[in-house]
Amino acid sequence: MERTLILVKPDGVQRGLAGEIIARFERRGLKLVGMKFIQMSQELAEQHYGVHKERPFYKDLVAYITSGPVVAMVWEGKEAIAAARSTMGATKPVEAAPGTIRGDFGMEIGRNLVHGSDSPENAVKEVKLFFDSSELVDWTRNTDPWIRE
Ligand code: DAT
Ligand code: MG
């Protein structure tokens, strides 16, 4: 079982797309185990995007992710990381397939609406960075047998 950190980035919130974006993960069959609406601090943003510290776009990336509130979520399921990333679409929205979040709503790499962890190791780190274990809910979804074999 995997857990993945998903963020609706500030553009998604500002454009009123948070519900639409959340619905796509929900309908896909991932299970929500944590969610909060937060304004990310500079420090949290720098930690979250630490892997990109040496990239030329790092400063803009931190400015963008702290430019307004985000919805931070943890979604759970078998292969949750890959499932979430295919629902998100390619990093560059113009290359993202129609039907994906970025392919349906995005035009710019610097306004690509959504974040999702990219590996099991990073998912564990990112979930810990945003959520205390007491904020994650263990629950049984009664529709699971209709989603999972
Ligand atoms: P993803 O968000 O799909 O996991 P990533 O981890 O490679 O992509 O990069 C994190 C974010 O940084 C990405 O969502 C948008 C931004 N970014 C990545 N590559 C970029 C580039 N070449 N120019 C500008 N922004 C970029
Ligand atoms: Mg990434």
Image: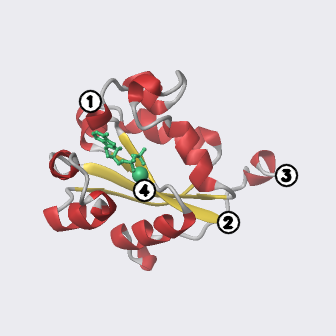
| Towards the viewer: 49 or 127 | 49
Q: Residue at x 52, y 21 (%)?
A: 98
Provide the residue designation for mark 4: 73
**Disc 2 versus disc 3: nearer the observer:** 2
- Residue 15's tag is 1
What's the distance in space between the residues labelled 2 and 3, CA to CA?
14 Å
Measure the alpha-carbon separation of dots 4 and 2.
16 Å
Q: Which mark is residue 1?
A: 2
Instruction: Quadrant for residue 105, please give it.
Output: top left
Q: Secondary structure at mark 2?
A: loop
Q: Amino acid at mark 3?
A: Glu
Please tell me which residue is depicted at 25% across the width and 52% down the height of the picture. 55
For badge 4, the amino acid type reads: Met
- Mark 3 to mark 1 CA distance (whole Å): 37 Å
Q: How far is the residue under mark 1 from the one under mark 4?
A: 18 Å
Q: Where residue 129 is drawn, which disc sits there?
A: none
Is mark 1 in CB contact (under 8 Å) with mark 2?
no
Helix, strand or loop for disc 1: loop
**Circle nearer the N terminus (1, 2):** 2
For badge 1, the amino acid type reads Arg
Nearer the observer, disc 4 or disc 2?
2
**Contact, mark 3 vs mark 4 (Cβ under 8 Å):** no
> Where does the image place residue 117, in percent across and percent down from the top left?
47, 56
